[in-house]
Image (cartoon, rainbow, N blue to C red):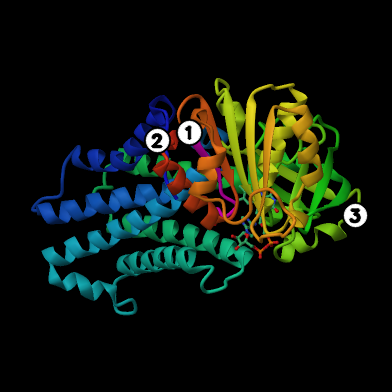
Amino acid sequence: MRRKPLQANEWFPWILVYSLVVAAPVFIMLIGPRPEGRLFLRDLSVAVAFCAMSIIGLQFVLTARIPSLKRPFGSDVVYYFHHRISVVAVGLILLHILVLAIDDGATWRLLAFWSAPMRARFAVASLLCLVALVLGSISRKKLRIEYITWRITHGFLAIGAVAFAMTHMQLVGIYLGLPWKRILWAIYSALWIGALAYARIARPILMKLRPYEVRSIEPERGNAWTVRLSPIGHAGAKFAPGQFAWITVARSPFADLEHPFSYSSSASNPDAPAFTIKAVGDFTAQIPELDVGTRVYVDGPFGAFSVDRKPSASEFVFIAGGIGITPIMSMLRTMHDREDTRVIHLIYAARTLGEMTFREELEQLQQQLNLRLHLVPTVAVDDWEGLSGRVESTMLDKLLTQGCRGGDCEIYICGPPPMMDALEDTLVDMGVPLQRIHTERFNLA
Ligand SMILES: Cc1cc2nc3c(=O)[nH]c(=O)nc-3n(C[C@H](O)[C@H](O)[C@H](O)COP(=O)(O)OP(=O)(O)OC[C@H]3O[C@@H](n4cnc5c(N)ncnc54)[C@H](O)[C@@H]3O)c2cc1C
């Protein structure tokens, strides 16, 4: 996945705050009386561990779905950062142990769980939780661990890693002696617990207060169903076309059994949101069996994949693969409702024409929008006069106007991960600036 450069004014404040929170314990550690006879190496190892601890605690904030944090970056960037920085944190913890061992070879003995003193046992327990967290996330699909099982385990391991590490720090006690240093860590703990409480208690309460019910379920091409919702006792949540929400169906919002889906309906009607869902696994296969009137909870909107973030663009290119058409459909429907006359190119690839979700409506939209539609079956068909096969550079070369490579043209891609990776590379090789390429990935985890 390519990382696009963001506007400095969007990310700079967040990166600054993040860096300060990570580094603050090190600066504060250096203020005030230091333990006598401490060697540089031992101080260094503690400083490294403090930074790791801050990073690990901040993971709760990153995953709490705080809207103002997700807005500038988009959810996929926040999750990507969350994954990568966790590896950094484990690396820092290992460095902490290594530096201690360089200073004093006897440190290795502290890793022997049963014979080690209590303070070291908590450190080992925390490290084991962290390693399990990272390995579990990297190899979940290879190990065929069910998403929900992984997610619940992930939550417990994360809480364990932080709780054990904090206990280890308190038992070691070095650099925590002064009351105000203890206060600093108490504030940090409150921040992490606050983020956890927001995610696990406050947000579900908010969802419970603003329920929805299933109004209709309609079959679509491509083994998908459109689920239309009606808000109960409220006006619905405003969203930008292309965004997504986390949906909990027929369960309590506290059950933590939610799934992300892009809005497929027009953002002009927030009181009638719709999601189009392809059956791929346990949850999505049950969608056609839902009854009208079933209670649904919606947490959202989230995401930065929206034409609304580029109001000055004069031309848009949408590239969709399979069910990746949903956020793009929301953008097209919204642009239609807004009587938007800007030029739109849509390249929509699916295995066959018959599997192209919303095909008839897309063909109709050609008459109502300034839309150039290119349906691309990836399996060749004899009587098909349009393009077919994989969407790649020769095809894009034919379809993209000069304006799309430079100018005020924005490109939005949503489809299977291999298609998205290949297209990002191809477009960049064709000279399209990375900041004009926007992606929505359906595989956050
Ligand atoms: C931002 C975003 C927008 C999406 N929009 C759509 C859409 O409009 N239409 C659509 O059909 N699909 C969409 N998806 C994909 C959809 O969330 C998954 O297909 C669905 O959650 C699969 O659940 P399952 O139990 O049926 O399948 P499973 O076989 O259990 O899961 C298949 C894969 O889906 C992912 N997944 C499963 N459960 C979850 C979960 N609770 N949270 C996050 N990921 C999960 C995992 O990567 C898993 O390996 C979107 C995903 C994301 C991240």
Would residue 319 be visible to someone looking at this image? yes
Q: Check disc 2 and report its element: helix, strand or loop.
A: loop
Tag in front: 3 or 1: 1
Above or below — where is 97 with respect to 30? below
Tag in front: 3 or 2: 2
Crowding near the residue tagged with mark 1, few <14, some 14–19, many ≥20 C-alpha atoms within 10 Å: many
Residue sitting nearer the eye, 202 or 335 = 335
In the rendered structure, the answer to whether residue 255 lies left or right of residue 188 reads right
Q: Are marks 1 and 2 in contact (CB under 8 Å)?
A: no
Above or below — where is 241 with respect to 174? above
Mark 1 / mark 2, whichever is N-terminal: 2
Crowding near the residue tagged with mark 2, few <14, some 14–19, many ≥20 C-alpha atoms within 10 Å: few
**Residue pictured at 29% horizontal, 71% vertical:** 117
Measured from the top left, where is residue 133 in percent x and y?
A: 45, 63
Name the residue carrying label 1.
436
Labelled disc at residue 5 = 2
Q: Quadrant of residue 255?
A: bottom right
Q: Amino acid at mark 1?
A: Arg
Name the residue carrying label 3.
291
Q: Does any atom of ligand 1 lie closer than 8 Å to the CB of label 2?
A: no
Q: Amino acid at mark 2?
A: Pro
Mark 3 / mark 1, whichever is N-terminal: 3
Measured from the top left, where is residue 183 in percent x and y?
A: 37, 40
Point out the stretch of residues depicted in magenta: 437-444
Measured from the top left, where is residue 50 in percent x and y?
A: 29, 49
**Residue pictured at 71% horizontal, 33% vertical:** 332
In the rendered structure, the answer to whether residue 438 lies left or right of residue 364 reads left
Q: Amino acid at mark 3?
A: Asp
Measured from the top left, where is residue 441 in percent x and y?
A: 56, 49
Q: Check disc 3 and report its element: helix, strand or loop.
A: loop
